[in-house]
């Protein structure tokens, strides 16, 4: 079968990125490639690839041709590192390895079954908890955004992500995007009792119908407040609140870098169980 690779116009334009798209087709569509180009000044070297080929059309060179188009698109836009995710041990994992990609980061995906109940965690002295839906309240958004920037020291394996820079505008933008999708962004935060400022938080995106599984967007503790059990406390409280607010919800999903042993221990102690592993692979472009 003769395959044609057609570039498409993608309407998914965002303030911090844009995508290039290619469709592989013969008598019918057989595969696609999406290339996310990053426009943040500190991350313009990165491009993220999502490549898919219909199972019945694999091993016929479709994926290779889509990858070639994506590589050219990345080079034309001055990206120097191409990232792609694949489930560990999958056909996609083997495809990337055979084409020069190296595993830069191993991610452990886990799930907490809400039907099993939630672990009770004692409060941490010197702190108090608060929670909200959507964007942070005006009185907390500045300290919340500052804690977001603490994610820059999170384990990232061998991948050079560059520095993530958060400001109040971007914090509000993320909340707006979730709302526009019809989903709920719910946050539990720990406040320093002496200052009233956010020093730790955990975010959860809940499906709009309150069914299925919700997805953690991140759990962060400011560096000077680590080692006191705040992450375990806020995640336990979030699980408790989620069960009460969304009784039809089945579970909570999260992913953690394999090297982030502290967060993995926290999740395991709360009842999260591994579902699968993903290799985040990288390819340096000459």
Image (cartoon, grey):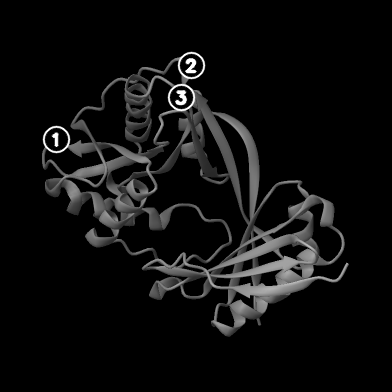
Q: Position of residue 70 (x, y in %)?
A: 65, 73
Residue located beneath label 2 in the image:
115
Would you say 207 lies left or right of 190 here?
right
Please report whichever mark, 2 or 3, sits nearer to the chain's N-terminal start: 2
Judged from the image, the secondary structure of the residue bearing numbered disc 3 is helix
> What residue is drawn where x is 18% and y is 54%?
142
Q: Position of residue 90 (x, y in %)?
A: 76, 47
Q: Position of residue 138 (x, y in %)?
A: 13, 49
Please report whichever mark, 2 or 1, sits nearer to the chain's N-terminal start: 2
Judged from the image, the secondary structure of the residue bearing numbered disc 1 is loop
Residue extending farthest to the front is 27
Look at the picture and state if 137 lies above or below 81.
above
How packed mark 2 is, by other alpha carbons closer than 10 Å (few <14, some 14-19, many 20 or more), is few
Of tags 2 and 1, which is closer to the observer?
2
How far apart marks 2 and 1 lie (CA) works out to 33 Å
Residue located beneath label 1 in the image:
193
Q: Position of residue 179 (x, y in %)?
A: 33, 46
């Amino acid at each position: 079968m003769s395959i044609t690779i057609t570039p498409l116009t993608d309407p998914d334009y965002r303030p911090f990125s844009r995508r290039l798209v290619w469709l592989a087709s013969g008598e019918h569509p057989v595969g696609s490639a999406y290339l996310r180009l990053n426009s943040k000044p500190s991350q313009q070297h990165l491009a993220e690839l999502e490549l898919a080929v219909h199972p019945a059309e694999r091993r016929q060179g479709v994926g290779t041709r889509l990858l070639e188009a994506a590589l050219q698109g990345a080079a034309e836009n001055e990206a120097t590192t191409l990232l792609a995710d694949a489930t560990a041990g999958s056909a996609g994992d083997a495809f990337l390895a055979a084409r020069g990609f190296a595993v830069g980061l191993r991610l452990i995906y886990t799930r907490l079954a809400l039907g099993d109940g939630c672990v009770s965690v004692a409060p941490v002295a010197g702190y108090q908890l608060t929670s909200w839906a959507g964007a942070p309240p005006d009185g907390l958004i500045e300290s919340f955004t500052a804690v977001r920037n603490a994610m820059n020291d999170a384990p990232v394996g061998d991948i050079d992500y560059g520095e993530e820079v958060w400001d109040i505008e971007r914090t509000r933008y993320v909340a707006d995007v979730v709302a526009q999708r019809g989903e709920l962004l719910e946050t539990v935060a720990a406040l320093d009792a002496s200052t009233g400022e956010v020093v730790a938080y955990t975010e959860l995106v809940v499906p709009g119908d309150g069914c299925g599984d919700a997805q953690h967007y991140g759990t962060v503790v400011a560096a000077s407040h680590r080692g006191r059990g705040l992450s375990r406390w806020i995640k336990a409280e979030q699980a408790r609140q989620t069960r009460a607010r969304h009784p039809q919800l089945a579970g909570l999903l999260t992913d953690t870098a394999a090297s982030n042993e502290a967060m993995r221990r926290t999740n395991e102690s709360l009842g999260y169980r591994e579902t699968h592993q993903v290799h985040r692979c990288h390819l340096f472009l000459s």
